Amino acid sequence: MAEMWINMGPQHPMTHGLWNLRVKVDGETIIEAEPVVGYLHRGWEKLTENRTYPQIIPLSDRLCYGASMSWSHLYCLAVEELMGVEVPERAEYIRVIVLELQRIASHLMWIAAYGTDLGLLTGFTYAMRERELFLDLLQSVTGARITYNYPRIGGVRNDLPAEFERDCLRALDFFEKKLDEYELIYDGSKIFLMRTQDVGVLTPSDGMNLGVTGPNLRGSGVKVDLRKTDPYSVYDELEWDMCTHPDCDCYARYRVRMEEMRMSAYIVRQALSKMPPGPFRVKPPRNAPKRTAVARVEDPRGEGLMYVIGDGTDKPYRLKVRSPIFVSVSAVPAILRGYKVADVPAIMGSIDMCLGETDR
Amino acid sequence: MVEESGDSSDRKFSENAIVDLVRGKFPEGVTIGGIGPRRINARADRAALYKLCEFLKGDLGFEHVSSVSGVDRVDLFQVVYHISSYSNRCLLEITVDIPTDDPEIDSIAPLWGGADWHERETYDMFGIKFRNHPRMERIFLPEDTHYFPFRKDFKLWRR
Amino acid sequence: MSAKEFMEWSSQVFDEVMRASGVKRGVDKITRPIWSWALRNSLFPLHFGIACCALEMAAASAPRWDAERFGFVFRSSPRQCDVLLVNGWITSKLRPDLRRLYEQMPEPKWVVAMGECAISGGPWYDSYNVVQGVDTFIPVDIHIPGCPPRPEAMLDGFLKLQDKIRHSTKGTFLED
């Protein structure tokens, strides 16, 4: 059979964003793959050099719109490290709560999209319905549905609203029951299991060498979670476990995300009960000193890192973003090789793409 | 950053042990800038970088490249490597200076596959070439772009 | 007279007779409401997510808003679509592809620019790689402001598009 190149993208129902996967096939088997990115590149890092430190927070929301909270939090963390700002403890707890709610919303978005990829439209409608629950909670805190502009350098913008704890606990109670329902739908679907089990195997050594992080790496059985191994905020004061799965395939990645949602709900409950009273914001200095700082967090999609260079003015000299999906996409050719073309949506869907942060 | 005391037992090397080993192996060419909890800053010469990375990967258990970033300091370029280790739980920052008239450095993509696209991005944005890289091409911008946008002499058109 | 010339001549005569007798205008007037009803109640937007607004597009078709009750069904091929929903910033790399998608869609077609980025470049107004608005290279019918607009706003924009179709559709002969 003759070998040929197939373009999947930029407009393709599989892509979840805007990119192009070129695959070289021999019959039905993929022998080579080449992702083409850059359709969303807007020079984010260059734009930040022309804006003051507080002006960059809404821009960093738009880095990854699936999990905007964690990106603006990461930016604030890096600048706090640069300026030497101490964040009040109440603000740290509020941040943990909104970050974990954001993680659940992001994973629900992923589950919904993965359902449509694999023909489980019921999964889409169910997961999107519960996602609205968490977007409503975040909206009651921040006032927006997707791009929040909520963390600030030295704290958060406003305190939690009245009755937030009651609403949040009710939402979590409801959600945990629904999570069992998802498992009935997804794990009970024979087609879903056939299309995900033993498909897209990523061995632990390959995953580490290729720089894959986050749930994709934990799905390969590697116990790495920056909330544990390089703790930031108050994650080391809370009791929780890392979620891993030893199977290395798409199904393992799905299982890791399901467990992480449960664990996030558990963390939110704990943080709500432990939250101390006090101030939620301190005033940061206007100008940053002449030094460098680096911060990294566990984004819902993997390791996010920001490297800031201050030059004594109120604008950063250079701001570098390390996006988890940018590196995971570069590992795609190694994962895809040897599988059939029909497996591409299952494998690419399991990586949880977000192109806004990839292209920056 | 909160200093955690309980996790030192399951680590292979502590920060100080890593610094001592690197200093013993590279008496010149590598200088250690500062040590913090789970953070090490270092500067390396352009010629010593690849050897240092080989040593880090082979003997010290640094499995993961977090990022490779370019910096334009106007009179010189810098490439900043963030290399992290899962077994040592530590992040190593290596800064390498490069002259502007000869922007070339050894690629570390043969050691860590994760550095591949980071280096391509640095080339795309700064024009810094990486020797022995499997595919040194533009990644974000179209192939026919004739400028390197992140250099300081490139001004945004509405500014 | 060749066959081709005869065809041209006959259709010209037929056209003139129809126009002079007023039959053409009558047929147009009778069929216009039918065409308009059919077009505006089956607007199929292209399933094409670019950036943040794509999430709101997905949320609009999810249970809480359920865009399908207005007849907005997302299709994956541009050849089956009437509406090009541009929901994000357009970079110089995407611009030729978007233009090609627009050319591939059959007439009649409409373009909706959703969000600040598609309208004017939005927060990336000074970027070197972002096109300053989709209306610089594609004719746009409806602008939906917001960053990102809520799903209600998106539905409202589509209802406005239905209104526009109601007032501007032509009849069978596509003449006014």
Image (cartoon, rainbow, N blue to C red):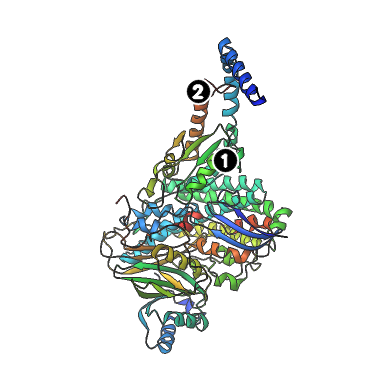
Is residue A99 toward the left or the right of residue A153 in the image?
right
Q: Position of residue B18 (x, y in %)?
A: 44, 83
Residue A142 visible in the shown view: yes
Residue at horizontal 65%, vertical 58%?
Answer: A4
The secondary element bearing badge 2 is classed as helix
Q: Position of residue B73 (x, y in %)?
A: 31, 68
Query: A128 or C23: which is nearer to us?
Result: C23
Q: Which mark is residue C167?
A: 2
Is residue A265 toward the left or the right of residue A98 in the image?
right
Q: Position of residue A309 (x, y in %)?
A: 33, 66
Q: Position of residue C82 (x, y in %)?
A: 57, 35
Query: A211 or B5: which is nearer to us?
Result: A211
User: Residue under circle 1?
Assistant: C104
Outermost residue toward the front? C1
* Residue type, label 2: His
The secondary element bearing badge 1 is classed as helix
Identify the subunit bearing mark 1.
C
Circle 1 Cα neighbour tier, 10 Å, few/some/many (<14 / 14–19 / ≥20): some
Is residue B140 toward the left or the right of residue A199 in the image?
left
